[in-house]
Amino acid sequence: MRWDNLFDDLESQLEHELTAEEIDLRAEEERLRLARLSLRDRILAVQEARGEASVPLLRLLLAGERMIDVRAITFGRDWFAAELVELSGRRSQCVVPLAAVAGLVLTRQQVELSLRPVAGSEVVPVRPVGVPDAGAGSSLSARLGLGYVLRDLCRRRRAIELHLATGMRLQGTIDRVGRDHFDMALHDAGVARRERDVTQYRVIPFEAIELVRI
């Protein structure tokens, strides 16, 4: 009987040690997963939960210390396109460089959602008007940089409202796009880009962009 008790104790102790080791291993794996999370991953995780009840809009603090509410739509390598929702109720589409995001203002629910593993993080098939179609169901959009988006807007001759990190807002059309900058012809909103209507030409580095309203 004593031998039976001894073996039972040994079995119980071994089971306890294996369980503790498994818990420690899972905790370490979770720490490593969190250490690999990027800001893009966390925004994308909140976006993936937008179909769940009571998930509010994502609030961003931009580099120019302005807060905006958005509903992310399409993700590129260093940018994302979103629906911009203003206090006035006006809704428009915009492109936000990830480098222009100074912070996320999250609810407790959004914090938890943002830490979820993201399945297929390279694919968000919905795209707004004016943002290049990378092909629904492909991972192409996740590899496209901000320059590609600007070149597409240039090719389409789309008038834009450019918000700079300095707080300045410019209306006009993109004329050409370089590796890290672009040329913009300034003209009034609602006016086609005609030479006679251009009031100024600007060369703008990508890093100065806070938001592009399409």
Image (cartoon, grey):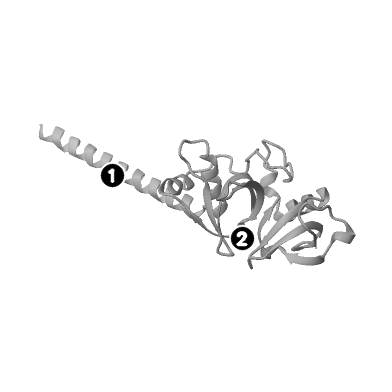
Closer to the camera in the image, 196 or 67 = 196
Residue type marked 2 = Ala
For the point 56% across and 61% down, the residue is 66
Q: Quadrant of the N terminus?
A: top left
Q: Secondary structure at mark 1?
A: helix
Q: Name the side, left or right, on which 203 lies relative to 93.
A: right
Residue 38 visible in the current orientation: no
Compared with residue 88, is residue 199 higher up or lower down, i.e. above or below? below
87 vs 124: above or below: below
Specify the label residue 17 is tagged with: 1
Q: Is residue 23 visible?
A: yes
Return the x and y of residue 12 as percentages of the image width and height: 22, 38
Q: Foreground: 86 or 12?
A: 86
Identify the secondary structure beneath mark 2.
helix
Q: Is residue 111 above or below residue 120?
A: below
Give x and y (percent) for residue 49.
51, 39
Residue 121: x and y in percent read 58, 43
- Judge left or right: residue 50 versus residue 100: left
Label 2 environment density (alpha carbons within 10 Å; few <14, some 14–19, many ≥20) = some
Q: Residue at position x 18%, y 39% from top?
A: 9
Going from N to C along the chain, the mark reached first, 2 or 1, is: 1
* Label number found at residue 99: 2
Q: Residues within 10 Å of mark 1 (few under 14, many from 20)?
A: few
Residue at the image point whose x is 65% and y is 47% from the top: 92
Closer to the camera, 77 or 20?
77
Q: Is residue 138 left or right of residue 4?
A: right
Q: Quadrant of residue 4?
A: top left
* Cα gap from disc 2 to disc 1, whole angstroms: 46 Å
Instruction: State if disc 1 and disc 2 touch (CB < 8 Å).
Output: no
Q: Which amino acid is tagged 1? A: Glu
Which label number is shown at residue 84? none
- Please identify, in this view, whether the residue under mark 2 or under mark 1 is nearer the observer: 2
